[in-house]
Amino acid sequence: MNEEKEEVRLPVKFIVNKDKTKVLFAEAGHDFTDALLSFLVLPLGTIMKILKKHKAPVIGSLSTLYNGLVNLDTFHFSTEDAKNLLLNPKSLDAGEHPRFDRAFTKARACFIIGDDLKVMRSVEGSIMSTLNRLGVAMTEMDEAETWNLKFGYKEMMALLRMMFVSRKPLTALLCGHKSTRGARQANPVVNKIGKRALLMNPKKMNLKVMMQKSTNKLLFAQAHGNFVSFLFGLLSIPLGRVEWYLHSSTGVTATDNLHSSIMDSLYGYDVMTAEAKDLLFKPPLFDDASCNEIDAQFGCCNDYLALTFDRSKSRCHVRGPGMYMVSDDLRVTPLSVSAGVSVINEMKVDLSDVEEVELQVGLEEGLRILKAALTSSMALTDGLIKPMLKNKNQPKQENIID
C-alpha cells in the first residue's frame, strides 16, 4: 500500500477485558486477515527497512546486519547493483509496503485472531473450544468490552513492529503494555531439518573468530566475502520462508504463530486455496542476484534443506579477496589490523589473552545463525560459539563426502 494513494482502512473488532489491560482476541474479515498474512511474504531486509523508518527498537542482530549493509561502501560489492538489490529485495509484493488488496483467504470468510497472532476460522468446533484454543478463560469474558477500530497503513506498520518485540502484540499495540519477546521451546535445529540433509551437503565455509582465552568470549570474526555474502543474503529471504526453514520455531512467538496457523487452522478448511497456502507457507525468492546465493545455501534437495556454500554454484554479492570483520551482532565492516586491535582494546582485552579459532559453517551452523539473528544481539555467540563449546569434549563426526 502506498501512503500517497487513497487510504484503505480495514475494520477489526477487538474484545478487551473489563480492566482494559488485555486484548482477549480480535474478530476480522478476510481483508484484515490477508493484510496480516501479507507480512509473511516480505523479505527480512524490507521488514528491517520499514522498522527502521518507523523507529522500531533493535531486532535481534538483523538491525545491525541491515545497518552494516547500508553503511558498507559500494566498492566492496561485486557489481554496482548488488548492494541496491540487497537493500531493496524483490518479493511477492513489489515495493516495501504490504498489499492490502492481495487475497490469500476467500472473500466473506471471518476469522478469530489471538493476542499472540494465532489465526483461525471464526468458530472452530464450538465457542468454548475456540476460546480454549485462544487461551481465553470464560471468566475473562465477563464484562469484556468491544472496540470497533479501523486499521490503515500506520496501524499495520505499528502491528508489524509489535510482532517482533512482544509475545502479545495486540495488547502491546492497543493497551500500551510492554511484553518481553517469548521463545517457544524447540528441539535443536539439526533434529528439525534431519541429519540426512547434513550428509547430503557436507561442504562448509571456513570462518576465523577472535576469542578471549580466559572467558571464551567472542570478540569478532574474520570473514571472506562468501560468508559476508551469506549474511547479507539472509536479508533477501521472505519472513514466511524463514519460518519454513525453521519449522515455525524461530523464537519470535507472534510470527511463529502466524505462520503455523496456515497449516493448523486455515488451509484445508475451505478458507484458503492450495496456491495461497504455498505462497504464504514457503514464499518464493524473486531476486536473481540472491536466488543463486540463498538457494545454494538453503535450497531444496529431495525435499531436504541443502547448504553447499559451493562457490561454483553460488554468486557472491561481496567483492573478494578482501577480508571483513563481523561483530557478534552481525555488523559487517572492512577488516584491517588497526581496526581489529582497536576493537580488542575497546573491549579491554589484553592481546596476550586473545586466540584465533577456526570454525566451519555449514547447514546446521547457518540455520543457527539465522535463528539467533531474529532474537539475539549475539548471533555469532548463540549460533556458533555456544554450540561449539557445548560439543567441545564430544567426539567429532566425520562428514560423508560423495
Image (cartoon, helix red, strand yellow):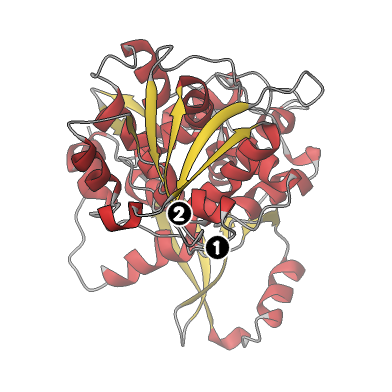
- The residue under the point 58% across, 40% down is 229
- Tell me where residue 371 appears, x and y as whole percent: 42, 50
Residue 306 in view, yes or no: no
Q: Which residue is mark 2?
A: 168
Numbered circle sitting on residue 177: 1
Q: Is residue 221 left or right of residue 391?
A: right
Q: What element does badge 1 sit on?
A: loop
- The residue under the point 53% across, 46% down is 227
The mark nearer the N terminus, 1 or 2, is 2
Numbered circle sitting on residue 198: none
Above-or-below relation of 289 to 327: above
- Tell me where residue 117 appears, x and y as whole percent: 41, 42
- The residue under the point 22% across, 32% down is 402
Q: Is residue 274 left or right of residue 50?
A: left
- Tell me where residue 205 appears, x and y as whole percent: 44, 46
- The residue under the point 73% across, 62% down is 336
User: For the residue carrying disc 1, how many other residues have a C-alpha within 10 Å: few (<14), some (14-19), or many (20+)?
Assistant: some
